[in-house]
Amino acid sequence: GQSLEQPSEVTAVEGAIVQINCTYQTSGFYGLSWYQQHDGGAPTFLSYNALDGLEETGRFSSFLSRSDSYGYLLLQELQMKDSASYFCAVKVDTGRRALTFGSGTRLQVQP
Amino acid sequence: DAGVTQSPTHLIKTRGQHVTLRCSPISGHKSVSWYQQVLGQGPQFIFQYYEKEERGRGNFPDRFSARQFPNYSSELNVNALLLGDSALYLCASSLARSRAPDTQYFGPGTRLTVL
């Protein structure tokens, strides 16, 4: 089976930098994705890492270490609109292309 | 381009009833996946369909079933509803490329309440 661990809540102030960690245990591994979900909304794709290292997309960056089964999402220059839940998700190499999600980290950005 | 659409947006049922949820994928996407999201949790995988064939099934009872039509739209059926089936049901479509990341694009979901 698969399991993913991430903090349940994180609080930060506008303009700050926040890191959301994710550790995973899977029987197979094909990549780590990050999704954002605002209250009442649908999850939206943020980033994906298949190989070790850092991927940068604007204010968001994502890092993966396959040897440590660990990744993180880095959010810079936080804005109030970044208040949302953030999920890490793994895609396991079983021929099934669905995702296994963590339980999510709720980010509160304060003025 | 239209995104993933789902209907209905909200639904209230009573225990023991049956429900059918519908999903239309993004044009050109051949894979549809269904997820259940309980409040405060991440989405849990239920089914994946590709080219009208089931490609994967999560840890859900046989009361849950689904199908995909020739136009790639999909239905999720749940029989003998239980209170614990109350959740947001999300549909996601993707191009189903064999290579990563094969990004899943989610619809707005159907909020099911079982009384």
Image (spheres, helix red, strand yellow):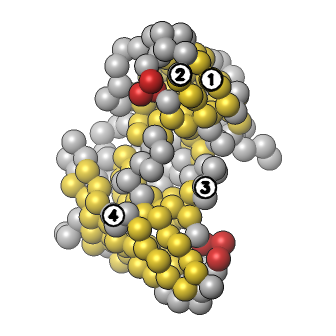
Q: Position of residue A30 (x, y in %)?
A: 33, 53
Residue with the mark numbered 2: B115
Q: CA distance from mark 1 to mark 3?
A: 20 Å
Real-space Cα distance between discs 3 and 4? 18 Å
Write down the residue under mark 3.
Answer: A39
Across and down, in percent, residue B88 comes to 55, 37
* Contact flag, marks 1 and 3 (Cβ < 8 Å): no
Contact between labelled residues 2 and 1, with CB atoms less than 8 Å apart: yes
B8 in relation to B19, above or below: below
* Residue A6: mark in rendering: 4
Q: Quadrant of residue A39?
A: bottom right
Task: Say if labels 1 and 3 share a chain.
Answer: no
Chain that bears disc 3:
A
User: Is the C terminus of chain A in the top left, top right, bottom left or bottom right quadrant?
Assistant: bottom right
Upstream in sequence: badge 1 or badge 2: 1
Which residue matches tag 1?
A: B12
Residue A37 picture location, percent across and down: 57, 57
Q: Are marks 1 and 4 in contact (CB under 8 Å)?
A: no
Alpha carbon distance from label 2 to label 3: 23 Å
**Mark 3 falls on what kind of element?**
loop
**What is the secondary structure assignment of the residue under circle 2?**
loop
Which secondary structure, mark 1?
strand
**Circles 3 and 4 on the same subunit:** yes
Q: Nearer the viewer, mark 2 or mark 3?
A: 2
- Residue in view at x 37 percent, y 46 percent: A100
Amino acid type at image mark 2: Leu
At label 3, the amino acid type is Asp
User: Which labelled disc corresponds to residue A109?
Assistant: none
